[in-house]
Each structure stands twice: as C-alpha cells, then as structure tokens.
Image: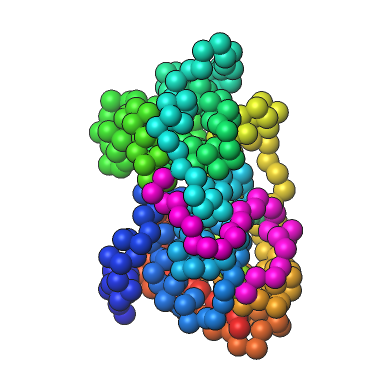
Amino acid sequence: MKTLREQLAMFNIADFNRQLTIPTTRYQGSKAKLMPWLWSHLQELSFDSALDAFGGTGVVGYWLKSQGKKVTYNDVLRFNYQIGMAIIENQRETLTDEDVRDILSPASGMKYQSFIADNFANIYYTDEENQWLDCVAQNINRLPSAYKQALAYYALIQACLVKRPFNLFHRRNLYIRTAEVARSFGNKTTWDRPFEQHFLSFVAEVNQLVFDNGEENRALHLDILNVPSGHDLVYFDPPYTTAAGASVDYLDFYHFLEGLVGYDQWPRMVDWHSAHRRLIRRDNLWTDKAKLRSNFRQLFDIHRHSLVAVSYRSDGMPAIGEIETDLKMFKRKVQSHYLSSYQYALSKQRTQEVLVIGE
Ligand SMILES: C[S@@+](CC[C@H](N)C(=O)[O-])C[C@H]1O[C@@H](n2cnc3c(N)ncnc32)[C@H](O)[C@@H]1O
C-alpha cells in the first residue's frame, strides 16, 4: 500500500501549492492537505457550479473557485462564514495600508468596550493581548465594507488560532503557554509573538488570495438543512462521529472566534457557568448520534438532482456502507474512493479518508 506522501506525490503538490496558498493554521477536519487527492476524483465529474456545504476553512470551495467553478460556500458558524466571504464571495477588495492602520490604532474620541479584558483574564491570552483584541475587534466593525471586514476577520481568526496551544479553545489553559516547563509539543515562539505581527502576516496572506474567477460566488451561514438546492455538484464534509459515537462539536472548540466576530452580541451568547466562557450550546443534528444516518438521507434527498460527493472516514458512524446504501436511493452510480494512512492531527489512531461519489 502506498504511503500518503507517495499518493499525494502523484497529484503534483508543488503545482497545488503554487496555485493555492492555504492558511498554515490547523482546523479540525480541514481538507487542505487532501485537496489534490479530492480534486483528482472531483475533476472526473462534469459540473459548472458547486456547493461546499460544510465549508470550514473554505479550502475546498476556494480550490473549486480557482478551477473556474461558480461556488456557493456555506458554514453554520459565523467566523467561518467570514472566511468564505473574504476568499470565495469577495472577488476584488483587499485591505490597504490605511485600512490596516485604522484597524490597529485606537480611534481618537472612540469609547472602547473591554469585554475580553474584563471576562477572559487568564483563560486564553495575556491581559495585554486581551486589550489588543478588544480594540481590534471593535475597529474591524468600523471598516467601510463587509468584504474588508471579512478580510480583517480572516487575519484576526488565523492570528488567534496560531497563538493557541492545540489551535483550540476547548480549555482554560493559558498556563500551557506561560509555564516555564519543558514541552514536547507546540511552538512557544509562535504563541508569544505579538498579535500584531501575526495579524500583519495574515493580512498579506489573505490579500493575495483574493481573485475574480468571473463567476458570482456566494458565502452563506445557514444550517445545512436550509441551504437551497440547485447546484451541479454538492460536496459534503460534515463533522465526523466515531463508531463509538464521539463527535466534534465545532462551536465548543472554536466558541471564542464565534464570539469575536459578533463582538456586540457576545455578552448575550456566553454560557456564564462555564469556566472557559464557552458559548451557550445550540442544538446541532450533527452531534446527535441518533440522528446522523437520517441527516445524511435528508441531505441526499434535498440535493437529489445534483452530483453528490461526501467526505467521511472509514471508521465512522454511519459506516461507509450505510452512506452508500442511502445514496443509492437517489443515485444510479455510487462509488467510494479510499485514501490510506491519513493520520489526523490530534489522533494516534490510523484511519482511512473516504470520498463517496454519487452520480
Ligand atoms: C469537517 S469540517 C469541514 C472542513 C472543511 N471541508 C475544510 O476543509 O476546512 C465540518 C464543518 O461543518 C460545520 N457545521 C457543523 N454543523 C453544521 C450545520 N448544521 N450546518 C452547516 N455547517 C455545519 C462546522 O462549523 C465545520 O466547519
């Protein structure tokens, strides 16, 4: 069996990297490293428009945009939607030096709120960093267009992620950064580099991701079951649930970013009983193991007239065989492609990435 490196080598990763500069930060379930493999299968299908239905980092939608497709990006979380707005829907706006100056310096005469400094002390960032975040989040809200705001949020989100151990907000663990102990993981230099430096480098990154592919691309932030049908291809990359029923709750992992992009509403969204100030939990069918199979079936039904591609893992719930069976209710031809030896960022377990295609 070929290793992941050997398999990816077949898809000319150098070309891929030249065409698509992807964020270096980790996001649970990101398909960034797998995109050449996914594309090797998707490109066999005939389609002009595509829905990236669980868009996350936007890497799949962005890749499809770069292939000249008309792309609709969707993710239920608003911070991800900002990424979709910045690099998929936005075709030409970038952040100028003047915009960046306005974001980074306190505006004269403006009275700033201190929600993060007041409520997140010793949880994720230092006091000084919290004050910086308060100021920048409020300045981003004052930018003159939704696309400029989205670009600035992109840079802020990436900066927040790289400064977090594990790139997550699931625990109150600033001490991991600050304790003087030997560590076998993470990068203290990156965590301690000032926010402003990270922000500026991500502004440069996102500015050069902006391009016009000549299509009217859209970003949405809807629950998946409310996303309209009518796309030639629909790509589903839902949260993964293990066979034992453990699932990834994206709102729990990334709640701080969701609060940050809704700064004015944040106080009303916080679960004040939680030590790490997560957001009040919302119902999500994708963390309810009793509903998973019927969720898939419902999606296949809604998008029955589209080509369907599903990313999942070989050891998940529902099983790949069940996904195939349900997709066959709506599709003439169903085929699964396996990529072996893909090791997930936080897991020791080896598992296979699978792409199920229904035509
Ligand atoms: C596996 S990740 C997608 C990763 C993405 N393909 C990438 O490469 O970055 C699943 C995504 O589904 C989103 N999500 C979870 N529940 C959702 C729902 N009910 N409707 C829409 N999106 C949802 C999460 O916010 C998360 O970003």
Residue 205 placed where, x, y %?
Answer: 37, 45
Residue 353 placed where, x, y %?
Answer: 45, 69
The answer to whether residue 208 is above or below residue 47 is above
The answer to whether residue 134 is above or below residue 334 is above
Identify which residue is drawn at 66% across, 84% down. 331
The answer to whether residue 39 is above or below residue 116 is below
Q: How many marks?
A: 0
Magenta stretch encompasses residue 225: yes
Q: Main secondary structure of the magenta part?
A: loop
Residue 5 placed where, x, y %?
Answer: 28, 69
Magenta stretch encompasses residue 129: no
Is residue 207 toward the left or the right of residue 356 in the image? Answer: left
Give residue 275's quadrant in the image: top right
Is residue 31 toward the left or the right of residue 270 in the image? Answer: left
Q: What residue span does the magenta drawing correspond to?
A: 207-232
Indicate the colouring scheme. Answer: rainbow
Quadrant of the rendering where the N terminus is positioned: bottom left
Identify which residue is drawn at 62% across, 34% down. 262
Is residue 175 toward the left or the right of residue 313 in the image? Answer: left
Residue 103 placed where, x, y %?
Answer: 47, 27
Identify which residue is drawn at 31% across, 35% down. 190
In the current view of this chain or complex, which residue is farthest to the left? 182
Identify which residue is drawn at 54% across, 50% down. 90
* Depth order, front residue of 337/199: 199
Ligand 1 sits in which quadrant?
bottom right
In the current view of this chain or complex, which residue is farthest to the top? 109
Quadrant of the rendering where the C terminus is positioned: bottom right
The reply to whether residue 56 is visible in this rendering is: no
* Depth order, front residue of 109/131: 109
